[in-house]
Image: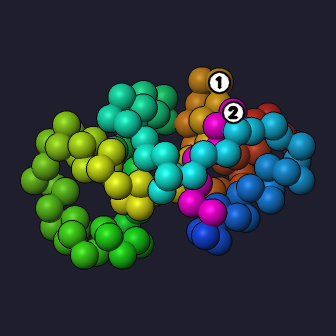
């Protein structure tokens, strides 16, 4: 499994701790140092079953600085993928990529269900 995170993010730290406490093996990837590619984002988006806008970090400073709330509705999918791939800080995190699933953001109940944990 790949755990895509930003180490300074409190939600990412909480999710990492949860994975460790549940003995889930994962490879950690710093989203700021190793930004997702357009191809990865398309793959994750398809596997997640989520609308593409759920991949945007709407509470982030960069999202607000770029006024993406107003711009996203007028952008096509390819433009949105390009924007997400341009800077990891625009991407919502953490992202957990497993065999056949992609979880965006940390929701313990959803992660338990995806990983088959009681």
Residue 43 in view (yes/no): yes
The quarter of the image holding the C terminus is top right
How far across and how far down the image is residue 24, in percent? 83, 40
For marks 1 and 2, give the CA distance: 7 Å
Where residue 61 sits: x, y (%)? Answer: 36, 75
Q: Residue at x 24, y 43 (%)?
A: 82
Can residue 54 be seen here? The reply is no
Q: Which of the 4 quarters of the picture holds residue 59? A: bottom left
The residue lying furthest to the left in this view is 74
In the image, the segment drawn in magenta is 1-7
Residue 65, numbered circle:
none
- Quadrant of the image occupied by residue 11: bottom right
Q: What element carries label 2?
A: loop
For label 2, the crowd category at 10 Å Cα-Cα, with few meaning under 14, some 14 to 19 and many 20 or more, is: some
User: Which of these two is toward me, 61 or 72?
Assistant: 61
Disc 2: which residue: 1
* Residue situated in front as seen by the camera: 110 or 45: 45
- Asked if residue 61 is positioned above or below residue 36 in the image, the reply reads below
Residue, disc 1: 99
- 6 part of magenta stretch: yes
> Which residue corresponds to the image point at 41% horizontal and 61% vertical from the top-left?
89
Residue 70, position in %: x, y?
16, 67
Q: Do the residues labelled 1 and 2 touch (CB within 8 Å)?
A: yes
Q: Height in image: 59 above or below 85?
A: below
At horizontal 70% and vertical 39% (from top left) the residue drawn is 27
Looking at the image, residue 117 sits to the left or right of residue 67; the answer is right
**Quadrant in which the N terminus is drawn:** top right
Q: Left or right: 1 with respect to 24?
A: left
Q: Is mark 1 on a helix, strand or loop?
A: loop
Of tags 1 and 2, which is closer to the observer?
A: 2
């Amino acid at each position: 499994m790949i755990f895509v995170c930003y180490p300074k993010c409190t939600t990412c730290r909480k999710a990492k701790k949860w994975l460790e406490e549940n003995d889930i093996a994962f490879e950690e990837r710093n989203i700021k140092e190793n930004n997702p590619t357009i191809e990865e984002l398309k793959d994750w988006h398809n596997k997640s079953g989520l609308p593409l806008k759920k991949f945007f970090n709407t509470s982030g400073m960069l999202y607000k600085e770029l006024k993406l709330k107003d711009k996203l509705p007028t952008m096509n999918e390819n433009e949105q993928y390009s924007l997400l791939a341009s800077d990891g800080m625009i991407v919502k995190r953490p992202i957990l990529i497993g065999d056949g699933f992609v979880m965006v953001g940390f929701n313990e109940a959803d992660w338990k269900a995806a990983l088959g944990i009681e």
